[in-house]
Amino acid sequence: MRHRRQKSIVNYIIVAANILIFLIVEMTGGSENAEHMIRCGASYTPYVQAGEYYRLFTSMFLHFGLRHLLNNMVLLFFLGDYMERFLGKVRYLILYLGGGLLGNVFSYWNEVQQGDNVVSAGASGAIFAVLGGMVILLLMNRGRLEDLSLTRVLLMAVLSLYVGFQSSGVDGFAHLGGFLGGALLTAIIGLLQKAGNRRNY
């Protein structure tokens, strides 16, 4: 008997929301206009320091230009599909939003330490949270889930993190913070799920 593959509705909604917000930003002033991006909710160090902490969240749904958007959404479309099916809708949403927020907090902390005033935006911290969560999930399942292997995913993660730190204009600290935050959240989710299963027996 065949089972229909469950659709990753939450991931589709996240991708669609990013695309819709990008189009709105483009039509109202341009996604590569730094001042307009700040008005739309991009993270800007002095404003966050002044108490506008919501920017650490809203910046996850903004992108600088079409290429930035497409690179992130293509990656999210495939990684998020796996993770939503493995974790479930609510847990996946917690991983994506929580991990992305932790990535932006880590990035902001680094900017404050360095004394940088940076305008930043993008879903990459949340995407790296999904990647970090995938590593933990593979570790919990003896290194393999469907056609994913721990070796491949770890290699992709290491290379992606390295490229992020070596490339100008890329927020490597948001990537690293998101990766670590996603790994931590998935570990907590996994432990809570195991505890819940034990109580059910």
Image: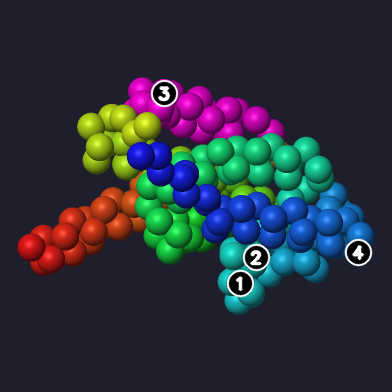
Q: Nearer the viewer, residue 60 or 18?
A: 18
Q: Amino acid at mark 4?
A: Thr
In three-dimensional space, the C-alpha distance between marks 2 and 4, rounded to whole angstroms, equals 17 Å
Q: Which mark is residue 152?
A: 3
* Residue position marked by numbered label 1 in the rendering: 54
Q: Are marks 2 and 3 in contact (CB under 8 Å)?
A: no
Q: Which residue is mark 4?
A: 28
Please identify the quadrant where the N terminus is shown.
Answer: top left
Q: Tell which of 201 and 28 is nearer to you.
A: 201
Disc 1 marks which amino acid? Tyr
Nearer to the camera, 109 or 124: 124
Dot 2: few (<14), some (14–19), or many (≥20) neighbours within 10 Å?
Answer: some
Q: Which residues are magenta?
A: 147-168
Tag 4 or tag 2, which sits nearer the N-term? 4
- Which is nearer the N-term, disc 2 or disc 3? 2
Q: Is residue 149 left or right of residue 178?
A: left
Percent of width and height locating residue 17: 69, 60
Marks 2/1: CA–CA distance: 6 Å
Disc 2 marks which amino acid? Answer: Thr
- Residue 126 horizontal/vertical position (percent): 53, 51
Q: Mark 3 vs mark 4: which is more N-terminal?
A: 4
Secondary structure category for the residue under label 1 = loop
- Compared with residue 168, is residue 89 higher up or lower down, i.e. above or below? below
Gap in Å between the C-alphas at discs 1 and 3? 35 Å
